[in-house]
Amino acid sequence: MSAVILDGLATAKSIKSELHNQVVSLKKAGINPGLGTILVGDDPGSHAYVSGKHRDCSEVGIDSVRIDLPGSASKSDILKAIHDLNSARDVTGYIIQLPLPVGIDSLELLEAMDPEKDADGLHPVNLGRLVLNVSGEMNSPIPCTPAGIVELLKRYDVSLEGKQVAVLGRGVTVGRPLGLLLTRKGIDATVTLLHSASKNIPEAVRNSDIVVAAVGVPNFVKRDWVRPGAAVLDVGITRVGNEDSAKLIGDVEQSVSEVAGFLSPNPGGVGPMTRAMLLKNVVQMASRT
């Protein structure tokens, strides 16, 4: 048995094509979607990720504004960039690239954002709307990685209704909002949220129809943990080795592909979907104006 690969690259390409058509229509109506990014510090992964987001914008026809600040930037410097984007007429949605350098309070900065321009869906107001089941479409953005996971499964006809889903990791960008999204009416999955203090993790994974690994521990999910035929999505990623020869390793052992029914690998799976959902949020934000 060999798993069907949930190809995030190909699926994201299709989504970007759909968004391009929407952007053309919006521009004809005098509406110009625009993405802004704030990047603090010199983390190579963050720089590569932000550069990819701006390339995506160019492909789709979305305008973009990039603000890069040094790691030595003060809180006041970052708040100024936030206020500039809050008031920028050519930016319909923007993000603060996470993680921020050590010592910077990300929550304080997220709270300074205009929630109506929060393209990542991580402002406390927007996370609260997710809890209240009023996020999505024209209301407020859904966090990009959870939205990308659900969309990827949907496009491969992997049913979520009534299914047991194990989510490994309780981070604010993936695990917690994904649990809320999966249990909302219309998706209707049953979620077990697992973390470092959870007991019998292998057993919980083995009892699940769908497994989402987002812990950032290389090869954490073992082959014998996975139920034959289950869908497995690898979200966590770790850089191993020195900067010149660093290798990216996901949370899921490669041999899981021999037992899983569907597998979203990392890299190449959920990552491209996250970026595509960011563009979708920006386009939907522009549509509200």
Image: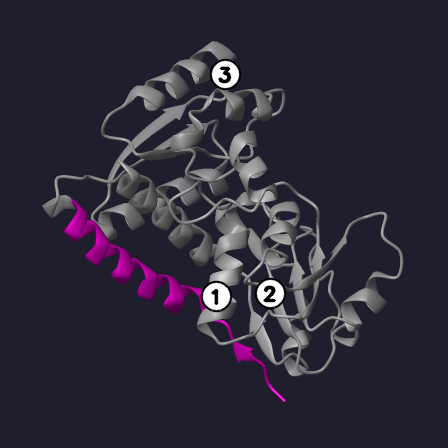
Q: In the image, residue 210 lies at what x, y percent? A: 66, 69
Tag 2–tag 1 contact (CB < 8 Å): yes
Taking the view exactly as shown, the residue that stands out farthest to the right is 199
Q: Is residue 183 above or below residue 50?
A: below
In this view, the residue in front, 208 or 99, is: 208
Is 194 magenta? The answer is: no
Q: Earlier in the sequence, mark 2 or mark 1?
A: 1
Q: Earlier in the sequence, mark 3 or mark 2?
A: 3
The quarter of the image holding the N terminus is: bottom right
Q: Is residue 138 above or below residue 163?
A: above
Helix or strand or loop: what does disc 1 sit on?
A: helix
Task: Calculate the distance from the C-alpha at mark 1 to the C-alpha at mark 3.
Answer: 38 Å
Q: Earlier in the sequence, mark 1 or mark 3?
A: 3
Position of 288 compared to 104: left or right? left
In this view, the residue in front, 21 or 263, is: 21
Tell me where the magenta segment starts and ends, as one range.
1-26
Residue labelled with disc 2: 233
Helix or strand or loop: what does disc 3 sit on?
A: loop
Three-letter code, disc 2: Leu
Position of 262 compared to 216: left or right? left
Residue drawn where x is 27% and y is 56% of the image: 19
Task: Calculate the distance from the C-alpha at mark 3 to the C-alpha at mark 2.
Answer: 36 Å
Residue 238 can be seen, yes or no: no
Residue drawn where x is 47% and y is 62% of the image: 151
Three-letter code, disc 3: Ser
In this view, the residue in front, 20 or 64, is: 20
